[in-house]
Amino acid sequence: MNPIRILLIEDNEGDILLTIEALTEGRIVNEVDVVKDGGAALDFLRKKGEYARSKTPDLILLDVNLPKKDGHEVLQSIKDDPALKTIPVIMLTTSSAASDILKAYKNHANCYITKPVEVDDFISTVAGIENFWVSIVKLPPRGQNEAME
């Protein structure tokens, strides 16, 4: 199985470390890039500035509460962009507010997961995400996003 590229958009250092740990402990080797704010996320995805050589991810893990542009704004920009909209976006956040959940799905999030508080539960949740989205789900072929429009 080919590794998949994951873009983690997260500003909390602890959550970044735990997520990467969970992904590297899995049986699948993934390429993980990390950006820490919504503006940088969009620059990464659009290959602007320092991210001109970035690789388009196969899957995005997106926090709601981010500096510069929040996760909802980033999600809406991704799903409004013909070159990006087929990339699955998983909202992975501490917020369990009904308004955040509804807004995420209205903006076409592929799923919404509330981060568990306990470390072992957090790692187990990320491992479950990896198992489902990497082992079970069929992702769009790389480089095909632009060809779909």
Image (spheres, helix red, strand yellow):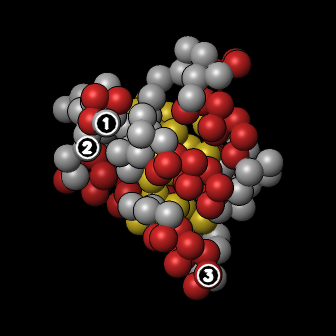
User: Which corner quadrant holds the N terminus?
Assistant: top left
Point out residue 139 in the picture as x, y percentages from the top left corner. 25, 43
Residue position for label 1: 149
For mark 3, does the 10 Å Cα neighbourhood hold few (<14), some (14 to 19), or many (20 or more) residues? few
Label annotation for residue 127: none
Q: Are marks 2 and 1 in contact (CB under 8 Å)?
A: no
Mark 2 surroundings: few (<14), some (14-19) or many (≥20) residues within 10 A = some
Q: Nearer the viewer, mark 3 or mark 1?
A: 1
Which residue, given by chain and number where applicable, does mark 3 sit on? Answer: 99
Please give the residue where the numbered disc 2 appears in the rendered image.
139
- State how far apart marks 3 and 2 are (Cα): 28 Å
- Separation of residues labelled 2 and 1 (CA atoms): 17 Å
**SS category of the residue bearing label 1:** loop
Residue drawn at (41%, 45%), measured in percent from left and top?
85
Q: Secondary structure at mark 3?
A: helix
- Residue type (three-letter) at the residue carrying disc 2: Leu
- Upstream in the sequence, badge 3 or badge 1? 3
Q: Where residue 62 sits: x, y (%)? A: 56, 53
Nearest the camera: 7 or 118?
Answer: 7
Q: Is residue 28 above or below residue 137?
A: above
Q: Locate the C terminus and report the quarter of the image it occupies.
A: top left
The crowding category of the residue bearing disc 1, from other C-alpha atoms within 10 Å (few below 14, some 14 to 19, many at least 20), is few
* Residue 101 horizontal side relative to residue 13, left or right: left
- Tell me which label, 2 or 1, sits earlier in the chain: 2
Would you identify the image quadrant in which residue 49 lies? top right
